Image (tube, rainbow, N blue to C red):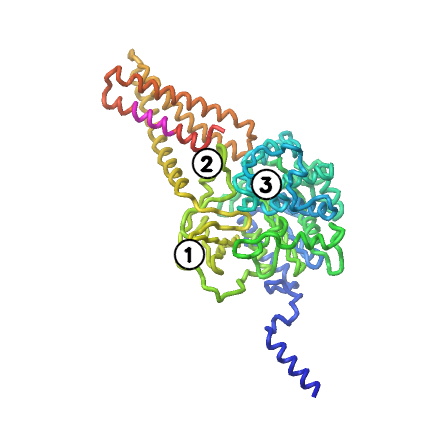
Amino acid sequence: MRKVILFVMFILLISQFPLTALAAPNRDATPSGIPYSELKQRVDKYAANYIGKTTTGAAVAIVKDGELIINSSYGFANLEKKIEVGENTVFEWGSATKLLVWTSVMQLVEQGKLNLEEDIQTYLPQGFFNKLKYDTPITMLNLMHHDAGWEDKYTDLFYLSAEDVSSLENTLRISEPSQINEPGEVVAYSNYGVALAGYIVEKITEQPFSNYVNEHIFGVLDMKDTSIHPSQEDNKSVALKREYIHGYLGNGDSEFSRSPNDRIYIGLYPAGSAIGTAEDAAKFIAALMPKKGKDSPLFESNTTLNKMLTTSDHYDDGIARNAHGFWHGMYAVDVLEHGGNTDSFSSNFTFSKEENLGVIVMTNQTAESGLSYGLSVLVYGDYVYEDGAVALSTAFDLEGSYMQARQVYKGFSKLMGVFMTGHLKAEDETTFTFLSMTFKQVAPYLYRSTDEHNLFLHFSKYDGKVEKVSMMISDMIPMSKGMKGFVIFSCFAAVISVLYLFASLLVMIVNSIGNRRKSVVITPIKKWSNLMNLAGIMAFLNMAILAYRTLYYASYASLKIHFWIYYAYIAIAIIGITIIVIQWKKVLYTKIQNMHYVVSSIVAFLLTVLIFGWELYK
């Protein structure tokens, strides 16, 4: 009788749970269902779809249960000389370097030298910040979550010469961004914030950050083929190997051109200057997933490691977003990840602690996504929303224009934020186009891109309106009516001004040729009108040159000459308009002349408004 009762109880017990929950996980296959015995073949086949098409070369490393099970190389490190990628080829990590910063921070937390919730000014020299807007303390957690409130910066991040790289402290001081949002309110990816965390490590340990990483991470893990110093002074072997690989730009149709910059040097180097082999990167990822019963060599206790890899920030819909600087990917299993891009390299580091599985992809192609992000989906499997019974939202309620929270808000480069604006247009109830991609709904107010980017968008609504759109590393906010109006006005004013100014230049050239043998009296009003128009053309050319130099890594200090040109234009515009107004009633002019002087004054006024509105003078 006792055996019968126990049997009945067992049947009742298992009837309350799905059989899949009781079944042991398939350790012989990836979360996506690929047998590990076939994984190398599947990875090679997948990579073949992108090598020579979206990137010239790549390295893929996969670790499982602490062992390197795949270390594959594809394509060319140097396309012109046909130098193939090999196991010793080094790649730039880009922003994946940030994982070294957060690991360093947590090592100091374990030692009791740093508190994640302490105001970071406790660890910095007095008066370090000059542009804080809010009294709310900024903590290390804010730096980890990228929600300290800072704007983005386009200057003094990259340099073309190693000689331009200053100390980390000096670079942080000259590149301090303005604080736009209150800490904790908006996520806006910040290289400055990460570099600042690296500097705090410097201050606490009293040694350069690169030295600290070499001693406490690279040295511990025997990562002999990786460097983090901005000019690789910490590892001459890596510096030499870096000379054998070049970065490339995709021109479409499987054609590539070599990056115009053989090398770039990162001033805020803790945010993205690591360079090394895929095998070394795999050693680092493996150390974050120690075997059962083993401690990670990076920490005194796995308690600290587990804390670092525990979710510390969520999206508004409750889905995990960040684990102390490690971003939560969205796959069939829990995955932490960090991508990286430099001038002409891309990388993506992903790992699943529960599966003890990590995937590292490194390419010598800027902004490569098919291999870097698609391979992770192949291995980990597609994300599936757990509760499919919840009523779905409608894409038509989400339409509108949205601006990146991660952008410049102060100074001349804030104009570039306009080009980071996206317009969301619904295609049907569950589909919309946005940021040149198509997104399909997978859950209420959660959408996924249909391409290999595997990009998810989370929508937050308040009082029936979209308040925020969140992707992994940054939020987007609806464009205000005022900003939208000013953008429309700016486009209109710029087009009208350019057309008129160049038409005026053409007329001046024609008149100059026709009157070259005649004695022509040039009145003050005509002289200043022509001068304003010529100065207006110079102002637009100055803008083009300023944008070009900014995009190609000129330092902020070297750009100040362009601001002085705008000061000169504003002075010419004010003087010219004043003289035209004064001289207007003194002489009778033809209708064409009157129109010319009026339009010249209006164009000068419009350009002055644009210069002030977009802060092109600073």
Label placed on residue 369? none
Q: Residues within 10 Å of mark 3 (few under 14, many from 20)?
A: many
Give the quarter of the figure containing the N terminus.
bottom right
* Front residue of this view, candidates 550 and 300: 300
Q: Residues within 10 Å of mark 2 (few under 14, many from 20)?
A: some
Question: Which amino acid, by three-letter code, is at mark 1?
Answer: Ala
Q: Is residue 520 magenta?
A: no
Residue 354 location (% of width, % of height):
66, 60
Q: Are marks 3 and 2 in contact (CB under 8 Å)?
A: no
* Front residue of this view, candidates 243 and 546: 546
Element at label 2: helix
Residue assigned mark 2 = 415
Residue assigned mark 3 = 191
Q: Quadrant of residue 268?
A: top right
Q: CA distance from mark 3 to mark 2?
A: 20 Å
Element at label 1: helix
